[in-house]
Image: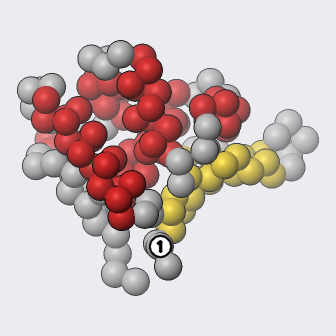
Amino acid sequence: MRVSRTKQLGDLEVTTTKLPTLRGSRLRMKVNRLLMGNGQKIEGGELTAELFTGFLAHLPDADADTLILESLVSTVVIRDDAQGSKIKFDLSNLSQIDLAFDGDDLAMWQAVLFSWEVNLANPTKGVVVKPDPAP
């Protein structure tokens, strides 16, 4: 059974399930290409949401969308609607990502980085991504 972890990001509850092995491996390769191919040093050894968006700025829009989708495909967001009812968003497509984050791109970037914590223990040297805790 694959590991799932949950994190509170502001008023959003984000749950990510670890990707299957081959899909996770492909994501790791893409992330490494993005981070290492850019040639930009990661100050303090931690990849922040703000720094991550800087890396994505060097990608064509379609490639950035694909990386975001591939990072969030095993992620669910739960948030309250205007009446206080819980709404669950399965982030398996771009329209669900748009609805879940409702214009809050920083929360989306934080969710992507959380997904990487779950899926990519140490995706590249110099980037702090904590490994999954032992089951």
Q: Secondary structure at mark 1?
A: loop
| Above or below: residue 9 compared with residue 66 | below
Which residue is more in the foreground, 98 or 22?
22
Which residue is more in the foreground, 71 or 6?
71
Say left or right for 71 vs 31: right
- Percent position of residue 40, x then y: 12, 26
Tell me, yes or no, if residue 109 can be seen here: no
Q: Residue tagged by mark 1? A: 2
Quadrant for the C terminus in the image: bottom left
Q: What residue occupies the far right of the structure in this picture? A: 83
| Above or below: residue 129 compared with residue 101 | below
- Rendered residue at 70%/46% (across/down): 89
In the rendered image, which quarter is residue 49 located in? top left
- Rendered residue at 45%/42% (across/down): 70
- Percent position of residue 92, x then y: 60, 44
Which residue is more in the foreground, 104 or 31?
31
Say left or right for 112 vs 127: right
- Callout 1: 10 Å neighbours few (<14), some, many (20+)? few
- Percent position of residue 80, x then y: 78, 45
Number of numbered discs overlaid on the protein picture? 1
- Rendered residue at 61%/37% (across/down): 93
Q: What residue occupies the far bottom of the structure in this picture? A: 135
Q: Amino acid at mark 1?
A: Arg
- Rendered residue at 62%/52% (across/down): 76
Q: What residue occupies the far front of the structure in this picture? A: 22
Tell me, yes or no, if residue 57 can be seen here: yes
